Image: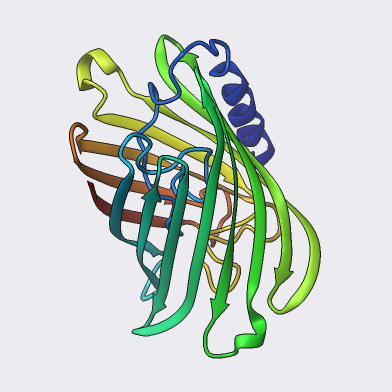
Amino acid sequence: MKKFVIAAVLLASFAVSGVFAQNVSAGAVNGMTLNGSTGLIVVPDARIAWEKPKVGVDIGYGFVWGGGQNFDHLPRFSVSLFQKFEVSGLMQMNSGNLQNFVLGGKFQLTKSGGTALALGGDIEFYNPVQNRNSAKLYLAATYGGNFFGMPAVTTATIGWQMLNRGSFSSQFIYGMGFSMSLFPQTFKNFVYWVTDFANFSYTVTGAMVNASNRGAFNTGIRIRPIKEGRFNLVIDVLGTDLLDDGGRGLSASITGGLAF
């Protein structure tokens, strides 16, 4: 079943890439991943949060619930600079204790027509045992198209987990997914379907989304009630790791931003 759904996601991802002339923002909203970088759910894309203003700041809070009392609280932020750079951060908290702090960065190499390319990475500081820090580098490609007449944007991300819980590593990481504007004539580009699949999660240590063995499939709805001007507001309601019995979770988050 899991292989079937993964294949369907891959086919859908290739299908939405059919019209490269589409603007890269037509089927997507600049939402936060669960670790603070701009992107889908756990997969960062090739965009930055604010691509027109010279400076933009976003602050968000989200949680992932794994059942019972298992909650990850995820306050996060991102700062966009000069239409090219993004700095992001996440504090992962569980049972009132700080588990990890993640600091990320992204540089948008190019954005032209319906495509964008970015180089990024992050480092995860594990608390309280500092010798279990982790770090990764990635390359993200994002491109626009149509899927059943609805604007969509597909992202594919590849990279290396260079440092894994304090040990140098050469683990290959990958993720892909899409954001699609749902029935734009009805919802006026306020409601989006976001989906991704990846072999990594929002943190290496202690994440409620367990992608270490067979990867994780995540999907949900992204709502953007404010989409013009200097202000931004994004609400996510998501299901995480939905194809793993015992690992499934629910997530909700809200992000607000301001451009200068």
Q: Residue at x 41, y 40 (%)?
A: 83
In the rendered image, the residue lying farthest to the bottom is 128
In this picture, is 144 found above or below 124?
Answer: above
Name the quadrant containing residue 91: bottom left
Q: Residue at x 66, y 30 (%)?
A: 7
Q: Residue at x 50, y 69 (%)?
A: 102
Residue 224: image x %, image y %? 24, 37
Looking at the picture, tell me which residue is in the foreground, 54 or 217.
Answer: 54
Looking at the picture, tell me which residue is in the foreground, 246 or 54.
Answer: 54
Residue 56: image x %, image y %? 30, 48
Tell me if 171 is positioned left or right of 61 in this view.
right
For residue 62, say whether it is visible.
yes
Residue 203: image x %, image y %? 55, 66
Q: How many marks?
A: 0
Looking at the picture, tell me which residue is in the foreground, 84 or 154.
Answer: 84
In this picture, is 235 found above or below 147?
Answer: below
For residue 208, say whether it is visible.
no
Q: Quadrant of the N terminus?
A: top right
Q: Residue at x 66, y 86 (%)?
A: 131
What kind of colouring is applied to the model shown? rainbow
Looking at the picture, tell me which residue is in the foreground, 206 or 124.
Answer: 124
Residue 133: image x %, image y %? 63, 77
In the rendered image, the residue lying farthest to the right is 170
Tell me if 167 is positioned left or right of 87 in this view.
right
In this picture, is 260 found above or below 109?
Answer: below
